[in-house]
Image: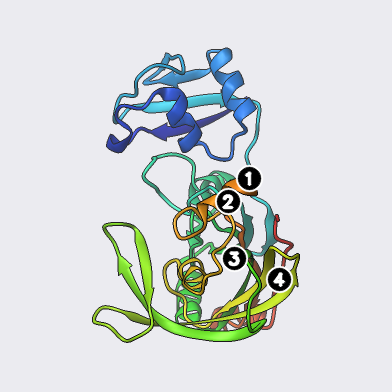
Amino acid sequence: MRVYTATVPQRASGMTLGAYAVQAFPLLSAHAVRDAFSARDVKMNGKRTDRDAPLIPGAEIRLYTPQEVSLPVVFENDRVLLINKPASINCDADEWGGMTVLSLMEERAQGKYRPRLCHRLDHQTSGLLLLCKDDDSEQCLFSAFRDRKLEKIYQCLVRGEMRPPSATREAYLIKDAEQARVRIVTHETPGALPIATHYETIGFDGVLSRLRVTLITGRTHQIRAHLSFLSHPILGDDKYGDRALNKRWKARDLKLCATELTLWPGGILSDLDGMHFSIQPPF
């Protein structure tokens, strides 16, 4: 029997325990959560609690289940760890106070090292995510990402046919921290950052295009917002996308995945130089 824990944040006040458990433990199946409540294997502050119970902000939630959650490891050595991140889970501590990539990888490490994130993928984005195990590797990889020595390539499904089928598009991105979203403009504006996105069409079925996307700049929500601005929103994107299309295609997850990573970190990680990793997207 495994136990998964979460700490109820203030923002969850007013929710029921059942609704919160779905948000706090995103990689547990609905069946596992339902069975845990049926078996009275969910505790709030140490007391067995039903799914309809109101949450107590600051309370510790413990859910017991035979389901074991693990993240697929693509590559590992004594300094770095490359995983295939699923959609619907945050990389590090989030607003729900529950399961994250970092918490799962810390559990896997069993105290032998402290995993650290070298970059991040959005909550809804899946794919290759690089972590490291020590201070020197962390510094080396931060520098490599900053200096664009690591190439990340994505695949996504978007609405419509891209014209032209391959291009590099430039624009400006303005971040709205209060709304947790960005917007794209065509001209330089105070507070706007320049962006460049390269795409290549690798398939079209008459409704949706499959794209291979390279970020020339790496800004918050850049791929999602830029493609939407170009009138080709990503399938499953309710923030920047076409909700009617998402509903019609029953797209509950964002169809965006980091599918390729090429490493040229140099320094103490020069043994990784030229290594290329690729995965198939889950869509």
Q: Which colour scheme appears in the figure?
A: rainbow
Location of mark 4 (residue): 277
Q: Is residue 28 above or below residue 41?
A: below
Location of mark 1 (residue): 250
Question: Given contact means CB atoms under 8 Å apart, are the residues at marks 1 and 4 in contact?
Answer: no
**Residue at image coords 49%, 59%:** 122
**Residue at image coords 63%, 45%:** 250
First of labels 3, 1 by sequence position: 3
Question: Given contact means CB atoms under 8 Å apart, are the residues at marks 2 and 3 in contact?
Answer: no
* Residue 97 marker: none
In this rendering, does residue 147 appear at all?
no
First of labels 2, 4 by sequence position: 2
Q: Secondary structure at mark 4?
A: strand
Instruction: Please name whichever residue, 80 or 113, is drawn nearer the observer in this view of the structure.
Output: 80
Task: Tell me the CA gap for discs 2 and 3.
Answer: 37 Å
Location of mark 3 (residue): 80
Q: Quadrant of residue 107?
A: top right
For the residues carrying marks 3 and 4, which lies nearer the camera in this image? 4
Task: Tell me the CA gap for discs 2 and 4.
Answer: 30 Å
Q: Is residue 116 above or below residue 267?
A: above
